[in-house]
Image (spheres, rainbow, N blue to C red):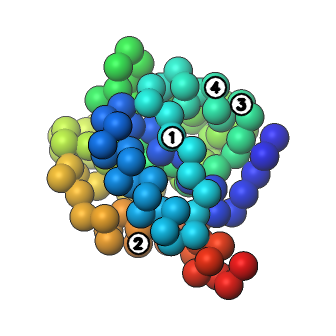
Amino acid sequence: MDTSDTFVLIVEDDVAIADVLAAMLRENGYQVLVAYSAGMAMELLTEVRPAVMTLDAALPGISGPTLLWHIRQQEATRELPVIMISAMVHLEREIGGSVQAFLPKPFNLGEVLARVRQLAGPGARAAGA
C-alpha cells in the first residue's frame, strides 16, 4: 500500500472542480489522485493511503456522507483526515465530528490549501523536498 505525507485524494464528481483543486494542490507540492465517485474512491483507498482526502457530499450513486460512514468503519481508513466540501451546508451539523473540516461551496482555494496544510503538512516543494 502506497503511503505519502504529501498525497491528497480528491473525491469530486464535477470534473471542473476536481481539476481546479488538483491543479492548486499540485502547484503547492502535493501528489494528487482524483476519484469521480464513491466507488472509485473506495477502490483507490485499497491501494493508497493519502495524508488527507477532500470529499464532495453529492456524488453519483453512493453519497459522500455514506462513503464517509464506510471509511470510518474500516480499520485502515478510520483515522483518515477528511475535508468535506459541499453546497449542502446543513450536512455540517449532521456529520458532526466525522470530518476534520467542512467547507461550503463555493469555496476559497486558499482556505482549502490552508486546511490541507493543517492536516497533511506542507507539500513536497514547500517543504524543500
Q: Secondary structure at mark 2?
A: helix
Q: Amino acid at mark 4?
A: Glu
Q: CA distance from mark 1 to mark 2?
A: 19 Å
For marks 2 and 3, the one nearer the N-term is 3
Residue 6 has which mark? none
Q: Name the residue that disc number 1 marks.
A: 34
Residue 46 has which mark? 3
For marks 4 and 2, the one nearer the N-term is 4
Q: CA distance from mark 4 to mark 2?
A: 27 Å
In front: 116, or 77?
Answer: 116
At horizontal 78% and vertical 46% (from top left) the residue drawn is 2
Q: Name the residue that disc number 2 marks.
A: 114
Residue 80 in the figure: left or right of residue 3: left
Crowding at label 4, few (<14), some or many (≥20) Cα neighbours within 10 Å? few
In the image, which is nearer the foreground, mark 4 or mark 1?
Answer: 1
Q: CA distance from mark 2 to mark 3?
A: 27 Å
* Dot 2 and dot 3 residues touching (CB under 8 Å): no
For marks 3 and 1, the one nearer the N-term is 1
In the image, which is nearer the foreground, mark 1 or mark 2?
Answer: 1
For marks 4 and 1, the one nearer the N-term is 1
Residue 83 in the image: above or below residue 13: below
Across and down, in percent, residue 64 comes to 39, 31
Q: Amino acid at mark 2?
A: Ala
For marks 1 and 2, the one nearer the N-term is 1
* Dot 1 and dot 2 residues touching (CB under 8 Å): no
Residue 43 has which mark? 4
Q: CA distance from mark 4 to mark 1?
A: 12 Å
Residue 124 in the figure: left or right of residue 13: right
